[in-house]
Image (tube, coloured by chain):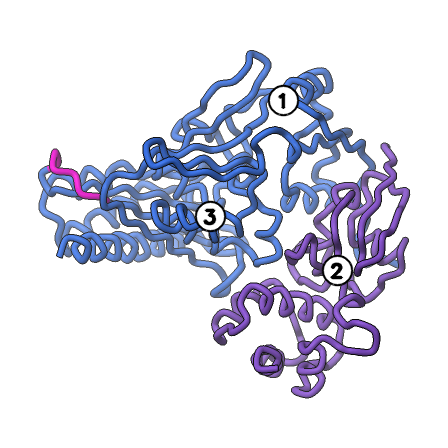
Amino acid sequence: MNAYPKLPEFDYVRPESYQEACQFLVSHAGEARPFIGGTDLFVQMRDRLYKPKYLVDIKGLDGTDKISFDPSHGLTIGAGVNMNRVIADPDVTRHYHVLAEAAESVASYQLRSRATIVGNICNASPAGDTIGACLLMDGVLNVFGENGERQEALSTFFLGPGKTTLKTGDIVSSIAFPLPHQGTQGRYIKLGRNQLSDLSIVGVTAVGYPDTSLQSGYQFKLALASVAPIPLVVDQVGEILGREAVSEESLRHAAEAAMEACTPIDDVRGSAQYRKYMVRNLSYRALKEVWVKLIDNVN
Amino acid sequence: MSFHRISLTINGELEQADISANMTLMDLLRDTLIFTGTKNGCAAGECGACTVLFNGEPINSCLVLAVECDGTEITTVEGLGRDSQLDPIQEAIMDAGGVQCGFCTPGILISARALLDRNPNPSVSEIKAALVGNLCRCTGYLRIIESIQEAARM
């Protein structure tokens, strides 16, 4: 006897081209779903939360297995590139370090052999660990849809838990990042029920870089996981830390603003009030660490 | 439901199988090809008892469809040793007493082999990070960690 039920029945489809994949998804709307790593999907299917009639494997499509960096344009990560490849990529660790740091906090090594950045984004969980880094590094999705190719900025992509602006037939082929601003520093701090591998109770991504157009001379950005219906970018943090000299006081002020901005819920992993306090404390810590790195970088 | 014929290499031997779309690699290994060293602990990618090497990289075989494995090379715990020669990590885990009930052991051995392949001299924290996805409820992990350190010296 098996301890757990097998996956429900479905048809496995492996299209040869984006056009074919898109047409199939459109003509089987409501019954078909594209997948890449399946690390989240198969668990939902096993638990009968989701029973698609067709699974469309897009891993064989052109460019999905490529990760490439161009010093004048930036980074492109194909939809099928697993997280371990992203973490080990020298261009990612050099120019987009916070993305590698966030990816490394996801689950376990063997899960990251299948899990992908694009999958993490399309899954649209408010707890998605890599989404904050992708948002703050200005990620743009390359999407193939019924009307051909288009780009979708991540900043307007998330609509709710599991809900995005993607339409039936859309296939995300890759995520692209522009070159980071000179001197960019970042930090991802994750609070889980254990030190490693758990889903986040709170996730804080902080990024900063020198910007002479601002009063303080530095642009800061902060994104929060697991404390709102969507991955939350707290604009007030950049405003507070941009308009006056960065100090212990302004960092604490910014962290308070992050706490005020989030709208967490009670769940099995933590209460809403606990999450709020943790947002304040971890936002302060992440922003401070970025600040220290920025100063060290100058000196 | 769709059915597929796949061929894949398991522990160096070419195998063919007729499978349904909803069969996972774990189901294929355990129920069809009878490589029962690979264990079914949680079927959700949490416990790591079903870990095997997929083209040299460790994966949770409960979260990979068998149909996705067409043309791949899979290594299960049965494939770690060659003939009567055990893998050093197998020798080391026996010597160190890193096995109690043994249910997690195949997955741990595979994760450890993969770690040593990519990092022949791992630190304790690197070993712990590599074993995050392999739960053991008996040993308290200390002897498992010692055995990986010992295997690295062998």
**Residue density around tag 1, few if under 14, some if 14–19, many if 20 or more, within 10 Å:** many
Marks 1 and 2 sit apart, C-alpha to C-alpha, by 32 Å
Task: Tell me the kind of residue under disc 1.
Answer: Tyr
On residue B75, which mark appears? 2
Camera-side residue of A192 and B86: B86
Specify the quadrant that holds the N terminus of chain A.
bottom right
- Vertical arrangement, residue A143 with respect to residue B36, above or below: above
Q: Colour of chain A?
A: blue
Give the colour chain B carries in the figure.
purple
Quarter of the image where one finds residue B6: top right
Please report the bounds of the magenta region as a residue range: A209-214
The CA distance from mark 1 to mark 3 is 28 Å
Q: Earlier in the sequence, mark 1 or mark 3?
A: 1
Magenta-drawn stretch contains A124? no
Local secondary structure at mark 1: helix
Q: Residues within 10 Å of mark 3 (few under 14, many from 20)?
A: many
Residue at 43% over, 32% down: A176
User: Is A248 in front, or is A10?
Assistant: A10
Residue, disc 3: A129
Q: Residue B101: where, in percent of width, then height?
A: 75, 78
